[in-house]
Every structure is written in structure tokens, then in C-alpha cells.
Image: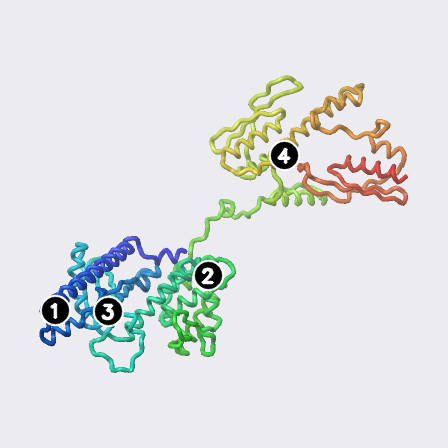
Amino acid sequence: MAKHASIYPAPEELEAVQALVSTVEGALKKVSDWMDGLNTSLGKTCTDTGAGDNKAEEDAADIKPDGTPALCGVTRVGLVAKGLLIKGDMDLELVLMCREKPTKLLLYTISANLPLQIQTMTEDKYEVQSCAPDAAIRVCSTKDPRLTLKITLSSLTMREEHDEEKEEDVLDRQKCQAALASLRHAKWFQVRVTDLKSCVIVLRIFRDMCNRLSGWQPLKGWPLELICEKAIATCNRPLGPGEALRRVMECIASGILLPGGPGVHDPCEREPTDVLSDLSAQQADAITHSAQHALRLLAFGQLYKVLNMDPLPTSRPSPRLLEGGCHKRLREDIGSDDRDFIKRMKVLDWRMTDPNHPMNALMRLNQIHPGLQYRLLSQSGPVHAPVFTMSVEIQGTTYQASGNSKRTAKLQVALKALQALGFVLGGDGDVDSLSADEKSDGEGKNDRMSTSSSSTSITSSTDTQEVGTPGPILTAGGKNPVMELNEKRRGLKYELISESGSSYDKRSCFLMRFISYDTCVAPHGKNHLANMNDVFVSSTKNH
């Protein structure tokens, strides 16, 4: 896109192009009206004079019936109609359609009256030149930017083949037929290429390459447009500019231009026509070799050499990399040879770097702004229901929040800070983690209360727990299932088979088993104690 921005015309140039084309189109409309009025007055004069001399009769015979205008219309073609203008390549073209075969007399008449009509529409000065060998009229601007507009005369009757002798006053047939072909090309381009993603951008880049490299010059124009459209449109998905450029290069490098290749069919001709028929074997070989070399440069990341531009600056590295550091923070030496501890640390690092891993608000905020300091502002409320107020400062802004524990207050202030900073929260993930922490705090309080009063019954201890927190699982005899199982089957061995989820995720699952005689039971649950309870139930059923 940087190359495309450098070759795209400036807004001032595009405004000058639009002004020139619009002015000439309006002036040609006035020329057509002037010619129609002249023919009408000439017809009335011939009718009033009656049977005059032979010249008057011939002039009267030239007047067309039904008041049909001699000029049918003007159409934009070429780069203007296709939107392929680039800097240094501003060829502007119009096709003026005539009802009959265009003649030199008609060409000179239009070129003589056109400057007068242009003066009535704008104060800018333009030069008008007639060029009969090219069957065209050229309009040139006299101020910067210097632009030239070519108006080619043509007619649908020029497509008809006649065995009669060539009329001397009629303009060149090949030039007129080429103008008709440019009309068909412009209509095809607007239907097939204009809405094709990245195709117009790639065509502008290739046009610049054709202007820079003489070897690519024979491919410029209609053949290049057909190749780009076929290469990009046959892909099963939209392509970006870089991918589209590479795909077109691969198509040309495959050898379609070489003799014996498939060629490129012209969709705008009635008869089967190969647009590469005028391309010599030497030219085709040179273009193919250049495309293959460009692909090798692309493979090694040297696209700037293909586009003849300076390499783009790389993104600025972080200060840690500038100081010679690495991307990841080095772990401090733990001074221990415990392999299990090192393995757990590696698993924790992987979970922290995994974007799909559930993460509460506190961890997310510390990941975005590491090294934050949380401060306890105040503590209020009774001893059995305290309220803690925590604060954190981020980029000069202080955020505060309260909770029934310090950890809950930190989660609340982290959640508030993330919302204020505009980060999209996971919704249920932060709420679940917050509620899980609150529940864990409630469970801890209940455990402390139950241990402090040993005389409290089991039913009273369950009533003091927080609403919604499940009570302990007991057997029919009121004992812990693990204790009762150990009394009945001594020497049991419990093994942890697998663990899924993280330690702070309430959705984690543990799979345990124990071996008793010839029976192996392996239940799974959300914690070790629940698994052992399931083990007890399974054991009592089996034995």
C-alpha cells in the first residue's frame, strides 16, 4: 500500500482531470446542438428555394430525416473510465460516436467550433488540435498540470466490412474500430474488475512497473488487465493487495505467455482472439523470466526491490530488547532442585500466557499494567462482617472499591479499573471468579468458626455457613467418609490419576482412585474430598 500511495495521483491532479473531461463533454454537447441547428436551417433554405442548382440538391440530400443528430454521444474510455490513472501516466480518452461514418470534414468542423464552446463554459485556456490520421481531436491544457485529452471519432457502421473502394474522405477504419474496441473494454472492466477486491490496486502497480521496465512494456494495457482479472477472480476468497500481487506474478511466471501456452482469450470479440498474438517469443521469455525473478525476491522478503522503493522501517522494539534483553522475563533462581516444583511453574507460565485460559479481573489488570501497588484505605464494620476498602493508582488515576475481604476488594477495584480503561470484559468470567473468591472467603470464615467452638453440633455448624455454600458430606453415622473408610479398610492407597483446570478455577476436575484387595475404584470430582467420598460410596456398594 505504501507503493500504491506513492504512485496514486494527487488530489489536485484528479480535480484537474475531472474539470477538463467535464468541460469537454459539455462543449461537445453544445457542438452537437449547433450542428443540428445548422442542418435544420439548411434544410429549410433548400426547401424554400425549390429546385435550385445541383449543389443545393446535393446539400439537401445530405440532410438526415426525422431530425436525427449527427453526433450520437460521447463516452469515457481508457484510464479515465477504468480509474487506473497514476503519476506520470495521465492519458485521457473520449470516444465521440457519430451516426454515420466519420469524415475529415466532420472532424475539422468539430475541431473549429469546439474552442468557441469551451470558452462559453470556463475561463481556463485550452488548445484544440485536429489529427486526421489518428481520427482524433486533442485538447491540451495550458497550465499545470499539463493534461491532454484525446477525442476519437467512430461509428457503429465502421464495423461493417465492404468490398467497395475506400472512400477518400472517411477517417481511418482501423482507428475507428480501435475506438469501438475501447468502448467494449471499458464496459467489461466496469462490470468485472471495478468491484473485484485489490484488482485495481494491483493494476496500478503493474502499470507503474511497465513504465519503469522496458521488458514489461508489451504487456501494458488490455492484456495486463485480462491477466489480473483472471488470476484474482479465480481465487476462492477475497485477496489483499499483497496476496493478489503475488498471485498475478505466479500466473505470469507459470509460462502462459510463452509460445505453445494457453494464451489469453479476449472476451470482447465475437471471434476467438488471443490478445497475446502480437507478443514475440523473445518478449514473452523476457517477461516470464522477470516474473520468476520477482517471485524469488518475494520469497526472501525483498518486495521493495520488485517495486523499486525503499524498504519500510521495522517496528520499534521494546526498551527491554534495546537493552539486550529477551522477550520474556527471566525467572529468578529458586535455588532448589525440586523437579516437581519447576514443572508446576512451567505449567503456570503456560496458563498465564494462554489467551483462552480463564483469567479474573485482578490477573488481567496485572497483565496489562504489571507492578501495581494495592493499598488498604480503611476497614469498617463489625468483626464478624468487616468491610475493606482498597485502592490502586493507574496512570495518575486512583480507583477505589470495597469488599467483605481484602481479596474481594482487590478484585472489585481491578474490575472497576478495567471498565474505566475501556477494556472489554469477559462478562461471566469475572463475575464467576469474584463469586468464587467470595465463597472461598466465606468457607474460610466458617471453618475458623467451627474449629474455635468444638462443642457445636454438626447441624449448627452447617447453619452458620453462607447461604448457597454446600455443607460437608457425612455418612449415616455422622462421620467423615474418609475416616470411616480407613477404619473399615486399613492400608488403603489413594492415587491422583489426573487433574484438569487450574487451581483458581472452580471448574477444575480431579480424578482419583484407591486400590483395595482386587477392587479398583476411580471416581472424579471437583476436589479431592469429593472424590474420596465417592470412593467410600463405591466401596460400600462393592463390599
- Residue nearest the observer in this picture, 59 or 476: 59
The residue labelled by disc 1 is: 46
Q: Can you give x and y, in whole percent of width and height, for residue 226 in the image? A: 41, 67
Marks 3 and 1, how far apart at CA: 32 Å
The residue labelled by disc 2 is: 244
Q: Tell me if label 3 and label 1 are in contact, CB under 8 Å.
A: no
Q: Residue at x 37, y 68 (%)?
A: 222
Q: Tell me if label 2 and label 3 are in contact, CB under 8 Å.
A: no
Chain-order first, disc 2 or disc 3? 3
Q: In the image, which disc is placed on residue 285?
A: none
Element class at badge 4: helix
The residue labelled by disc 3 is: 136
Amino acid type of disc 4?
A: Ser
Q: Quadrant of residue 363?
A: top right
- Residue nearest the observer in this picture, 83 or 243: 83
Element class at badge 2: helix
Q: Residue at x 76, y 22 (%)?
A: 461
